[in-house]
Image: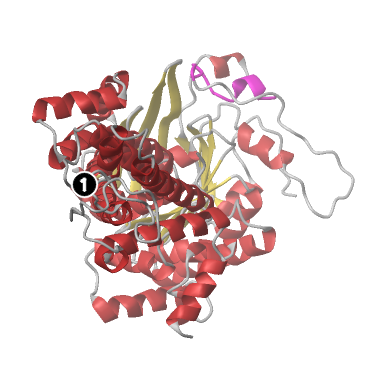
Amino acid sequence: MSATPLLSVKDLGVVFSTPRGALQAVDGLTLDIRPGEILGLVGESGSGKSVTLRAILRLLRGAATVSGQIHFKGEDLLNAPERRMQQLRGGSIGMIFQEPMTALNPVLTIGLQIEETLAAHGLRQGRARRASAIELLRQVGIPSPQSRLGAYPHEFSGGMRQRAMIAIALAASPTLLLADEPTTALDVTIQDQILKLLKRLTSELGMAMILVTHDLGVVAETCDRVTVMYAGRVAETAPVETLFAAPRHAYTQALLRSAPHGGTPRTMLNPIQGQPPHLAAPARGCAFAPRCDFAVAQCSTARPPLEALAEDQSSACLARDRLPPWRAA
Amino acid sequence: MTTLARVFRRTRSMSPPLLVGAAIIVLMLVCVAAPSALAPYDPLAFDYSALLQPPSLAHPFGADNFGRDILSRTIYATRIDIQIALFATLAPLLVGSLVGLIAGYFGGWPDLLLGRIIDLVLTFPFLVIVIAIVAVLGPGLINMYIAVSVVGWVFYARLMRGEVLVQKQLDYVSAARVLGYGSARILFRHILPNASRPILVYWVTDMALKILLGSSLGYLGLGAQPPEAEWGVLIADGKNFFTQAWWMTLFPGAAIVLAGLGFSLAGDGLADALDVKR
């Protein structure tokens, strides 16, 4: 189980300097992803999920300062030369986006955009390149791929575009796929298809995936392990069954309690009171303490460390042993 | 389907301004391609029996003070004026787009420098600075092209920079970076085609402005030089005889108006067709 991680992120910090002061978007984030597994990255809007993905590929520039360590297959990504990063992006590490409507270049055909990725990474030539483009479209479930090569993005529906995006991301056979809310912009039936497709592709191609989402249902259905983020920090990491069965962080519990459950009609939802903290002033203690029902004085003075527990679970919560017994809904 | 039928189908889907503008431009291109087929006389041939003759069947636009046929001279002048429309805009289009592309994409000090240069150029009235440069270099078409290009590229650079700033925020550019594409590939293959529509529209409109500018400078004696037929030069020739021979200025003037109208209409129509907001 504890194989060497494919990607290991240690103590990652991302600070955006804005005209109104520094924003700590990601704060001491640590996570590992093992070969072939699907890791869910969950959290509210602004909890730093997407920023983390972009930091891994070093796509943040200008106003962002990144600290900590990111190692991919033992290679230090934060200190790699830009040229090497270009090889990795779209090569060993693919990424897909939330908005398939805008993530494709409107003036190039789908076929050209796939072939271009192959070309940029020096893979295959001429006919063979075209053949692999067709094969990729077939792989992501686009019907009659041969005739779709010449189509422009506007001729595709949302779901089809997301499939095309996935095909482009897979072109260079990456070992890690970063998926930034890939289903948020799609309607529910298509969401399900795309998630099943991603799950199938990861197992078929032996590829690992980080799936960023704020939808716990998606996590339960798709992921092997989950990392819960709050205010740019890791609250809890656990295998997916463990997380839903026995959450060991007050925030995770509150989050699970706030989600609607099927089968129990007419019960009130339990929202988490209050707002997430403002990132301009990182909390000295636990970022969740002001909204937490179980907080003690110590919670707001000392930052709880991320401690490894049994069964591959780790949690940064001082109250984890005082939480009420959790019955899985 | 025959080519002609296809052309007909294409033109039917064009908006009226675009159609009219395109028709005027096609008419002028015909004048450029085969002036000898359209013009009844040699534009430079003197005819002392026809001095200052008013419009007639023999000379539909009349004749000038050397008996030269105004219609023929107006047709031949199209050549110079279309040449002005192209040569006075081509270098600004290419250089300005490239500079705007680079400044907009990379930002930083090239962008700051460009901003200051644009401010500096915009401080001067366009015509005044062009005339000043031509005055230093000496009159003539080539020097006029140089003067117009030295000033004109900033407008394209400004437009392109703004467009690139919009485009580079879009997801497909992040996607291109995520796929490991180099800056050159992203700039020229992805951003440029998407950012070029407003620039193309401006280019067409700018040709109208440059025809007006070219004839203004020709009129002032700073552009095309007599005896070469150019609309502005023709008007300048006619101004001394305005009270006796209004046709010497009216018809070349009408040609300028028509050319300006044609390119403006085409520019507007193109803007609508390409959905460019202005």
Residue B260: quarter of image? top left
Query: Main structural element of the magenta stretch: helix, strand or loop?
Result: loop
Q: Position of residue B241 (x, y in %)?
A: 31, 35
- The answer to whether residue A59 is seen in the rendering is no
Q: Residue at x 29, y 57 (%)?
A: B72
A286 part of magenta stretch = yes
The residue lying at 19 percent from left, 48 percent from top is A83
Q: Amino acid at mark 1?
A: Phe
In the rendered structure, the answer to whether residue A231 lies left or right of residue B214 reads: right
Q: How many marks?
A: 1
Give the image location of residue A283, x and y in percent: 51, 18
Left or right, A136 with respect to B106, comes to: right
Vertical relation: A104 (above or below) A167: above
Q: Is residue B148 magenta?
A: no
Residue B227 position, x and y percent, is 16, 45
Residue B167, image x, y percentages: 41, 44
Callout 1 environment at 10 Å: few (<14), some (14 to 19), or many (20+)? some
User: Which residue matches tag 1?
Assistant: B66
State which region is magenta. A280-293
Q: Chain of mark 1?
A: B
